[in-house]
Image (cartoon, rainbow, N blue to C red):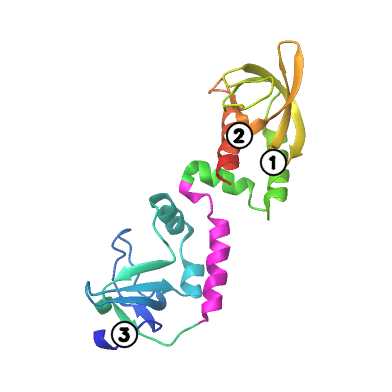
Amino acid sequence: MQNKIEAGDAVVVKPNVEDPDLNINIGGWQGRISEVDKNYDTICIKWDSLTLKNMPAEIIDQCEEKGLDWSQIYLSPTDVELVSPRDSVEDVEEAIQHLERKHRWSFLGEEGKRIQAILSQAGDDSSAFEAWNAYLQQMLEFPFEAEVSEFQERGPLQADDRVKVHGIEGSEDPYGILVSLRKGRRKYVFPLCDLEVIDETSSNYQPVNDYAVWFANR
């Protein structure tokens, strides 16, 4: 059996075989061989679309957090058996793209789950800002004290300046969501992503921080 396995073959994992990184039973999972390494006696299996669609969400999230590729695995040739393919390569790519969008922020752990929930209905950056705007309008209590958290190349405000934020003004590329604020008697419109709520116990702290993390990693 081992000598018959070649790149491109469809295979199924034998019963009771465990994922060497996650220590879970992956018996019955199916895919295609993408690589055969005879020197190390290993094969790389790219999961097929049916396996990907039935993969538990928590497994994908765990892989993202650990920096593991959930779309493929390395096993011994003795761990699998040849089968007939159940889908096409195009089906696999479509399933991967769907899951990548769904779990894009999982690498951030609990913070990523909150971000993903906010963006669940957004299709692109434009609609993403709309989703954040609606969420922040609902969650934030104005006014609140904040601090400029990022270096500013120019402008009247600089890092570590303390300001009072009074409301959301909208969004504008490339600055993202803009807020109205005051420093002393002067009014400004400023990117929310460059602010941090001073009071870490405030209900405003987490939503603003989650938005800033999303903006920096989008």
Name the residue at 76% across, 14% down.
186
The amino acid type found where label 1 is placed reads Pro
Q: Position of residue 158 (x, y in %)?
A: 61, 20
Q: Position of residue 46 (x, y in %)?
A: 42, 72
Single out the mark in the foreground, 3 or 1: 1
Residue range in magenta is: 87-107
> In the depicted view, which residue is nearer to us: 189 or 199?
189
Mark 3 highlights which residue?
5
> Is 101 within the magenta?
yes
Name the residue at 59% across, 47% down.
218
Name the residue at 55% across, 44% down.
217
> In the depicted view, which residue is nearer to us: 185 or 104?
185
**45 lies left or right of 41:** right
The amino acid type found where label 2 is placed reads Pro
**135 lies left or right of 50:** right
Looking at the image, is 108 positioned above or below residue 198? below
Mark 2 highlights which residue?
207
**What whole-number distance in Å separates the C-alpha atoms at marks 3 and 1?**
51 Å
Single out the mark in the foreground, 3 or 2: 3
Q: Which mark is residue 174?
A: 1
Q: Secondary structure at mark 3?
A: loop
Q: Which of disc 2 and disc 1 is earlier in sequence?
A: 1
